[in-house]
Image (cartoon, rainbow, N blue to C red):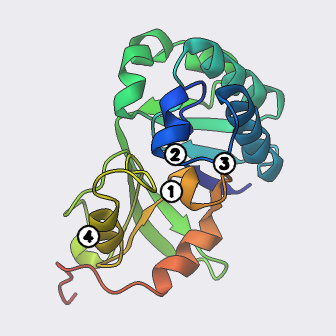
């Protein structure tokens, strides 16, 4: 069983193509291609951590949850700003699709490398300057910021200043990022600004 991470699909959202300069002719093509890409990497029993802004319309949410259920993928939905209108509707219903599905505003997990070493990791839709265990070089995975929107340069610099990674699908060829890929990427990043000696 593997862990996968992604965010900001914005399925069915016309503006996402424009403000993200996404390479799709329309929302139908974009939505179907993103869903196809995401589920072509994940396997039965995997955890797919989605870090916010899933869809612009509940019909696309239904499609994603049905696809995850059919493939026996556990869908872990961390809410983004565009998800709030659907949060109350799916808070309990998400488990109807799969009892292992879950919904959160923020979550803390541990990533594990091939040697069994654990890395505390905070998952949130929004980037944070400080988070739990950041002073021990814990990881932060986030989304919300897009490839070409206002502030993209600031976020790019923010990512380079510690163990942080934007998992927005626009930065990862519209596919999920694996646990091992994240650990490897973090190895090449500098220490967190608030790191203290143990």
10 Å neighbourhood of mark 3: few (<14), some, or many (≥20)?
A: few
Quadrant housing residue 116: bottom right
Q: What residue is drawn where x is 43% and y is 65%?
A: 165
Measure how far apart labels 1 and 2 are at the Cα level.
6 Å
The N terminus lies in which quarter of the figure? Answer: bottom right
Q: Is residue 174 visible?
A: yes
Pair 1/3: label in front: 3
Asked which secondary structure carries label 2, the reply is loop
Q: Which residue is mark 1?
A: 167
Asked which secondary structure carries label 3, the reply is loop
Counting residues from the start of the chain, the first of labels 2 and 3 encountered is 2
Quadrant housing residue 70: top right
Counting from the top left corner in percent of width and height, residue 156 is at: 36, 69
Confirm or deny contact between disc 4 and disc 3 (CB under 8 A): no
Counting from the top left corner in percent of width and height, residue 168 is at: 50, 52
Label of residue 56 in the image: none
10 Å neighbourhood of mark 2: few (<14), some, or many (≥20)?
A: many
Asked which secondary structure carries label 4, the reply is helix
Label of residue 134 in the image: 4
> Compared to 156, does 148 lie above or below?
above
Residue 36 lies left or right of residue 2; in this view the side is: right
Q: Which residue is mark 3?
A: 23
Asked which secondary structure carries label 1, the reply is loop
Counting residues from the start of the chain, the first of labels 1 and 3 encountered is 3
Q: Which residue is mark 2?
A: 7
Counting residues from the start of the chain, the first of labels 4 and 3 encountered is 3
Measure how far apart labels 2 and 4 are at the Cα level.
21 Å
Q: What residue is drawn where x is 67% and y is 24%?
A: 65
Pair 4/3: label in front: 3
Q: What residue is drawn where x is 54% and y is 27%?
A: 14
């Amino acid at each position: 069983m593997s862990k996968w991470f992604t965010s900001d699909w914005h399925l069915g959202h016309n503006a996402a193509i424009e403000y993200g300069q996404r390479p799709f002719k329309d929302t139908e093509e974009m939505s179907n291609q993103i869903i196809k890409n995401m589920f072509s990497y994940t396997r039965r029993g995997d955890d797919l951590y989605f870090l916010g802004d899933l869809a612009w319309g509940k019909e696309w949410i239904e499609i994603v949850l049905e696809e995850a259920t059919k493939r026996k993928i556990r869908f872990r939905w961390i809410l983004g700003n565009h998800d709030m209108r659907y949060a109350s509707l799916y808070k309990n219903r998400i488990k109807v699709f799969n009892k292992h599905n879950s919904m959160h505003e923020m979550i803390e997990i541990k990533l594990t490398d091939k040697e069994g070493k654990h890395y505390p990791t905070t998952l949130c839709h929004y980037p944070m300057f400080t988070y739990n265990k950041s002073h021990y070089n814990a990881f932060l995975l986030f989304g919300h910021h897009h490839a070409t929107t206002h502030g993209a340069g600031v976020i790019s610099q923010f990512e380079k200043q510690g163990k942080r990674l934007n998992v927005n699908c626009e930065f990862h060829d519209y596919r999920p990022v694996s646990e091992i890929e994240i650990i490897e990427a973090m190895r090449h990043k500098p220490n967190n600004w608030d790191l203290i000696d143990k």
